[in-house]
Amino acid sequence: MNAKSILKDTSIAFLEQYLNNASPTGFEAEGQKIWMDYLKPYVDTLITDTYGTAVGVINPDAPYKVVIEGHSDEISWYVNYITEDGLIYVIRNGGSDHQIAPSKIVNIHTKNGIVKGVFGWPAIHTRNRDKEENPKISNLFIDTGCDNKAAVEKMGIHVGCVITYPDEFMIMNENKFVCRAIDNRMGGFMIAEVARLLHENEVKLPFGLYITNSVQEEVGLRGAEMITKTIKPNVAIVTDVCHDTSTPMIDMKIEGEIKIGKGPVITYAPAVQNNLRELILDAALANEIPFQRLASSRVTGTDTDAFAYSNGGVASALISLPLRYMHTTVEMVHREDVENVIKLIYESLLKIKNNESFSYFK
């Protein structure tokens, strides 16, 4: 399989629709509908749980269960306080970066639809030149153009309304995908593409495959924590993003050496089961898939941790996609890395398939 031929025009159209749709933590339903509609032709059945994690299942009656997983939510803000003058103060929903907020346009989600606003910021002429104040949660505010609190509330805005950025998908220099929320709806996209390839190549699996798009990763791996108890998998291959460390102001001695365009990242960590990681490495080498390595000292900080330590222990591994500018509105990945993550998950599943005793993970 040639990595350059993996993504079809229909794949890119789905990716654009999926990324452009808002899917903030706790409010992932609309994004999950888009994802399930795309996945439906390639699986035997679809399930969802109470909080909205979506799972496409191939071969659901098989006793041995393998999960491939990404997460569907994006960082956002909540309306926390509305002043009498109609300005809105916020709190985080997930790991939203306060430093990028000033002067950004936002979408405030209400029952009446989306209301536009802006994160206001004092002009450079008016700021204290001796000691400029940095952006922080306590001084960030949204201006909707209203003169008072009553006018804000009349538009349907209230405490608890969720706020997202409208920045949409674009392709830069032919091979860079840029958008907000690539962390980690790109994971949902990649596992859906694996399901498509299995279907189109008529691969028959001797195990049940659970293509899992979890909710609420950004607030503590909560969706994965819930769904692993439902599925009770034997194996979990998780995909998420990790930091490209080749850009300015990042210390490689601390963060490791990772660069977009150099391939998927395979993680070494306590939560990563050694035999499963070695199977993935073998699949990469056998199929000439470029890869990079990363070490995590305590936790991976991804849904891998939730799967690994559930149900008495699940053999789990992490394949990451190198990403620039995480938790900003211009997250950037390399198209070839996306294709190679898809290929590596696909080839790892074939390798598991060919080891039908599954003793590899004991």
Image (cartoon, grey):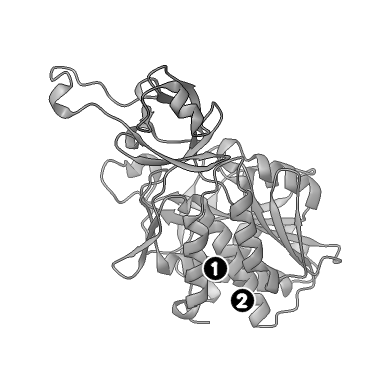
Q: Which mark is residue 211?
A: none
> Alpha-carbon distance for marks 2 and 1?
9 Å
Q: Which residue is mark 2?
A: 197
Q: Quadrant of the rendered structure where residue 125 is?
A: top left
Amino acid beneath label 1: Ile
Position of residue 327 measured from the top left corner of the image (x, y, whole percent): 42, 43
Comes first in the chain, label 2 or label 1 = 2
Q: Considering the numbered disc 1 on the image, is that residue within a helix, a strand or a loop?
A: helix
Residue 181 shown left or right of residue 218 in the figure: left
Q: Which residue is mark 1?
A: 342
Graded by Cα atoms within 10 Å as few (under 14), some (14 to 19) or many (20 or more), the crowding at tag 1 reads many
Q: Is residue 266 above or below residue 117?
A: below
Residue 44 shown left or right of residue 330 in the figure: right
Callout 2–callout 1 Cβ contact below 8 Å: yes
Quarter holding the C terminus is bottom right
Position of residue 272 measured from the top left corner of the image (x, y, whole percent): 62, 49
Amino acid beneath label 2: Leu
Q: Considering the numbered disc 2 on the image, is that residue within a helix, a strand or a loop?
A: helix
Q: Residue at x 65, y 65 (%)?
A: 37
Q: Residue at x 40, y 22 (%)?
A: 148
Q: Is residue 274 above or below residue 51?
A: below
Q: Does any portion of residue 191 appear in the rendered image?
A: yes
Q: Is residue 140 above or below residue 3?
A: above
Q: Considering depth in this image, is 295 or 60 the residue closer to the camera? A: 60
Q: Residue at x 67, y 78 (%)?
A: 199
Q: Is residue 132 above or below residue 24?
A: above
Position of residue 349 measured from the top left corner of the image (x, y, whole percent): 66, 69
Q: Quadrant of the rendered structure where residue 64 is?
A: bottom right
Graded by Cα atoms within 10 Å as few (under 14), some (14 to 19) or many (20 or more), the crowding at tag 2 reads some
Q: Does any portion of residue 271 appear in the rendered image?
A: no
